[in-house]
Image (tube, helix red, strand yellow):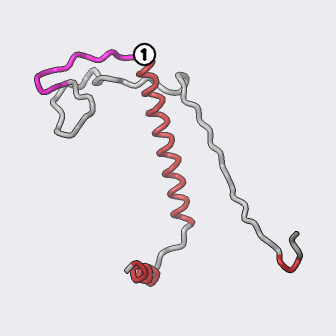
């Protein structure tokens, strides 16, 4: 039981739900190989993207289209949408955050030592 002298307060969180669908109607299938105008070149060390070239010469052309190309297209679209959304959230939080003063920054550095 809560009496008037000892009131409890509860904070209520606000939730925003964003729903997006990625399907063949709004996502193109990914290109697996190189675009038609790009020549195969040996990739730089550590670059594991498809380059069309191996140490010993050109690679055969990969099969384009199909279910896997469509799935990769869905994933690429979802990643772009997620990046846009998260960037927007971060920018809003930065705009709402109080400015950090040089004095507050110095106090924070002293606490960390």
Q: Is residue 76 above or below residue 3?
A: above
Look at 25% across and 16% down and name the residue there: 61
* Residue 79 located left or right of residue 58: right
Q: Is residue 82 above or below residue 21?
A: below
Q: Residue furthest left?
A: 56
What range of the chain is rendered magenta?
53-66
Residue 61 within the segment the image draws in magenta? yes
Look at 62% across and 38% down and name the residue there: 19
Q: Position of residue 85 (x, y in %)?
A: 53, 47
Q: Is residue 95 above or below residue 49?
A: below
Q: Position of residue 60 (x, y in %)?
A: 22, 16
Q: Which image quarter: residue 39?
A: top left
Q: Position of residue 11 (x, y in %)?
A: 72, 65
Residue 77 within the segment the image draws in magenta? no
Look at 42% across and 27% down and name the residue there: 72
Q: Quadrant of the C terminus?
A: bottom left
* Residue 23 located left or right of residue 107: right
In the picture of the structure, the residue carrying the numbered disc 1 is 66
Element carrying mark 1: helix
**Which secondary structure is most common in the magenta stretch?**
loop
Check disc 1: other Cα within 10 Å, few if <14, some if 14-19, many if 20+.
few
Q: Residue furthest front?
A: 1
Q: Quadrant of the N terminus?
A: bottom right
Q: Position of residue 87 (x, y in %)?
A: 48, 51
Look at 66% across and 49% down and name the residue there: 16
- Number of marks drawn: 1
Q: Which image quarter: residue 112?
A: bottom left
């Amino acid at each position: 039981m809560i009496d008037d002298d000892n009131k409890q307060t509860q904070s209520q969180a606000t939730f925003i739900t964003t729903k997006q669908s990625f399907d063949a109607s709004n996502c193109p299938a990914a290109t697996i190989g190189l675009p038609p105008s790009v020549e195969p070149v040996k990739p730089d060390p550590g670059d594991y993207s498809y380059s069309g070239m191996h140490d010993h010469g050109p690679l055969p052309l990969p099969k384009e289209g199909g279910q896997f190309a469509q799935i990769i297209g869905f994933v690429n679209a979802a990643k772009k949408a997620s990046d846009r959304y998260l960037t927007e959230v971060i920018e809003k939080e930065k705009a709402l955050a109080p400015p950090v003063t040089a004095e507050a920054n110095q106090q924070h550095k002293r606490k960390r030592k």
